[in-house]
Amino acid sequence: MSLPLSQSTWASIETVFLDMDGTLLDLHFDNHFWLEHLPQRYAEIKGKKAQDAEQELLAMYAAKKGSLDWYCLDYWSEVLDVNIVALKQEVAERINVLPGVESFLQWVRKQDKRIVMVTNAHRDSLELKLQRVTLGHYFDRLISAHDLCEAKEVDGFWEKLQHEEPFITDRTLLIDDNASVLASAQRYGIKWLYGIAQPDRQQPQVKLDGFTALESLVDLVGGETD
Ligand SMILES: [Mg+2]
């Protein structure tokens, strides 16, 4: 698919669904929190050896990956018996918007499209992040997968979303850094699907099988953002 999208393609798009973590926001915060900060603080709080705490957490993450529990702060607060929101606050200065995101949102806003954030993030996580970055005003609506009781990776999610937030598959664009989410949206029939080349700016670029990965969201609109 050549970039940017043509004017006629943009004219055909009515709804823009955007993921949050790794798409609008640098995934570095989440990676740092779950892989470094939480293991370290969990070890301190529980009096465990750092290496033991890390092994324990990694095994627990692996067992829950892709499920709604994986994204649920209440779940982790309960099973680990720590206050995840408070621990996230300790490193909240690492929450950052990815380059090009605001220009893209400003441009799409001017085109009078419906813009909806569709995230697997828990409401508390959404709130914490939107307190740190001022992106909320660009959206007509913010939807957490927790409200629909299904993760975006799961077939059935898009049907549930359709009831909550009606959209025409041929006239919908979804941008998400998760290839499993793009694949599930594709099976449902969403026409315009894009991934993100470098969700975590402190890690190398990633390759998404079968989907075009954007270096920046503005690549979809070319030089038209002014
Ligand atoms: Mg994401």
Image (cartoon, rainbow, N blue to C red):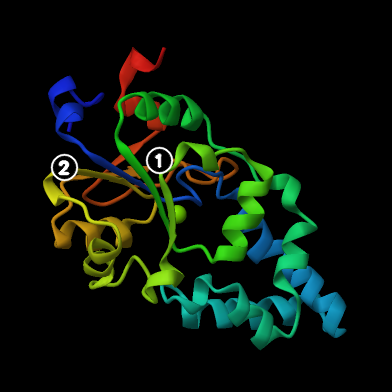
Q: For the residue labelled by badge 1, is the local secondary structure a helix, a strand or a loop?
A: loop
* Place of residue 29 in the rendered image (x, y in percent of width and height, measured from the top left): 64, 52
Image quadrant assignment for residue 223: top left
* Place of residue 150 in the rendered image (x, y in percent of width and height, measured from the top left): 36, 74
Tell me the kind of residue under disc 2: Arg
Tell me the kind of residue under disc 1: Ala
* Numbered marks: total: 2
* Place of residue 214 in the rendered image (x, y in percent of width and height, measured from the top left): 35, 35
Q: Is residue 32 above or below residue 133?
A: below
Instruction: Describe residue 170's horizontal placement relative to residue 23 as left or right.
Output: left
* Place of residue 163 in the rendered image (x, y in percent of width and height, measured from the top left): 24, 65
User: In the image, which disc is placed on residue 171?
Assistant: 2
Q: Label 1: which residue?
A: 197
How busy is the neighbourhood of tag 2: few (under 14 within 10 Å), some, or many (20 plus)? some
Which is in the foreground here, disc 1 or disc 2? 2
Q: Does any atom of ligand 1 lie closer than 8 Å to the CB of label 2?
A: no
Residue occupying image coordinates x 27% and y 55%: 182
Label whose residue precedes the other's in the sequence (1 or 2): 2
Residue nearer the viewer, 201 or 204: 201
Residue nearer the viewer, 177 or 133: 133
